[in-house]
Image (cartoon, helix red, strand yellow):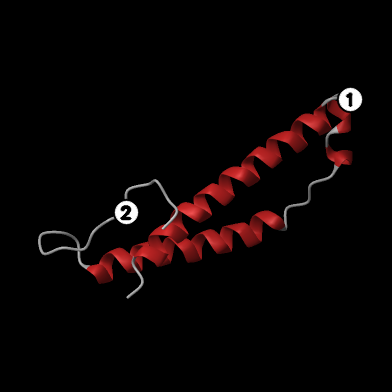
Amino acid sequence: MTTTTPLPIVHLNGTSHRILADGWNNAGEALEDFITAYEQIEFNARDYYVQGPEAWSVARDYKSEMNLKIRELKKYINDHRSHLQP
């Protein structure tokens, strides 16, 4: 396992394996749906240039930052999903 995030341990006094696995799997599937929708958003310089010459590069940099955060979230969820595989 390559994560430094603490992962849940299934034990007698904790949440059941099924509830944990279902929750993380549902979150992963919802994130995949979000990623598909997010990738379909039109993102073009023509929609930014009226704000000034720097607007497109700022928007592009911010979108790149958001893409990194989405990948981090995907890894976080998938680490939990993998950990909870039967």
Residue 7 shows which numbered tag? 2
Quadrant where the C terminus sits is: bottom left
**For residue 32, which quarter of the picture?**
bottom right
Q: Residue furthest front?
A: 1
Image-based side of 38 in relation to 24, left or right: right
Give above or below for 14 relative to 43: below
Quadrant where the N terminus sits is: bottom left
Residue at screen point 36% across, 72% down? 85
In the image, what residue type sits under mark 1?
Pro
Identify the mark nearer the N-term, 1 or 2: 2
Task: State the image coordinates of residue 55 (x, y, percent, origin top left).
Answer: 81, 28
The nearer-to-camera label among 1 and 2 is 2
Residue at screen point 72% across, 58% down? 40
Query: Dot 2 surroundings within 10 Å: few (below 14), some, or many (20 or more)?
Result: few
In the image, what residue type sits under mark 2?
Leu
Give above or below for 34 relative to 16: above
From the image, tell me which residue sits under label 1. 53
Task: State the image coordinates of residue 73 (x, y, percent, origin top left).
Answer: 50, 50
Image-based side of 7 in relation to 35, left or right: left
Q: Residue furthest bottom?
A: 86
Image-based side of 44 in relation to 76, left or right: right
Q: CA distance from mark 1 to mark 2?
A: 46 Å
